[in-house]
Image (spheres, helix red, strand yellow):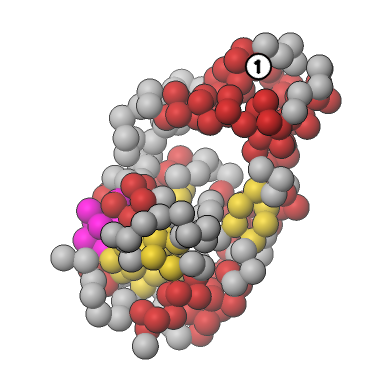
Amino acid sequence: MPVTHSPKAVLLDVGGTLFEARPGAPEVYAAVLSRLGAAVDAREVAPVFRRVWEDLTQLHPRGLDRYHGLKGGEREWWGEFVRRVLADLGHAAPWERALDELLEEFARPELWYVFPEVTEVLGRLRSRGVPLAVVSNWDSRLPALLARLGLAGSFDAVLASAIEGVEKPDAAIFRRAAARLGVAPCECVHAGDSPLDDYRGAESAGMRPVLVDRAGSFANGYDRISDLRGLYDLFR
């Protein structure tokens, strides 16, 4: 059963939970492609980006890391992503140059907006001796990005799916995080913004799930918080 008492450890998702890209991915893609060829608007890119993401995500079994099944690993996966976006848009930018520039853009800390309460919450939890871990479906650049954002030192463990070889919602990545923190899964709470990957995934691992619902987008049926300060209530 998921933990119902005060948890001993906290696991956190990344995108939409700790920070998000601002401008968003469609805006970044539009800017890069416009530099490399015909001008394209983010409003054109957005539906294409979503469709290609959904298509490629569905090509691998849920819970299995998407990068390990390809001979070229992460670069090949992102290369296929960029090629499909370009083909769908009918854009003539050279895909390899576009890929290189996009990888560089998303590695810049300036692109990422850390939500206002994050530093405070991480600091308060650490001051109480609460072990913290990141559990994210992200490529292998995540540890370096967390360091550039000044967040790496707040975590006792960072589990990125590309490094672990398993993705949320598979229970294995959650249980692995608990083991690295030296606690049982039932002693953990996991907070993230995805009802499936985060909430159901953590629940299946025997953890207490909390849905980070910043925009108030989800109906009742979830244990929800509007931002990470809602975690304080679990430690009273």
Magenta-colored stretch includes residue 105: no
Relative image position of residue 38 (x, y in whole percent): 81, 17
Relative image position of residue 134 (x, y in whole percent): 46, 59
Q: Is residue 185 above or below residue 27?
A: below
What amino acid is found at the position of numbered circle 1 in the picture? Leu
Q: Which residues are magenta?
A: 201-207
Quadrant into which the N terminus falls: bottom left
> Is 97 on the left or on the right of 176, as rendered?
right
Q: How many marks?
A: 1
Relative image position of residue 115 (x, y in whole percent): 62, 64
Q: Residue 163, can we see it?
A: no
Relative image position of residue 32 (x, y in whole percent): 77, 29
Q: What residue is rendered at 30% in x and 51% in y?
A: 201
Q: What residue is rendered at 25% in x and 80% in y?
A: 5
Q: Is residue 63 above or below residue 56?
A: below
Observer-nearest of 46 and 157: 46
Magenta-colored stretch includes residue 206: yes
Observer-nearest of 113 and 137: 113
Q: What residue is rendered at 71% in x and 45% in y?
A: 23
> Is 177 on the left or on the right of 214, as rendered?
left
Q: What residue is rendered at 31% in x and 69% in y?
A: 188
Q: Residue furthest bottom?
A: 236
State the residue position of label 1: 89
Q: Residue 48, can we see it?
A: yes
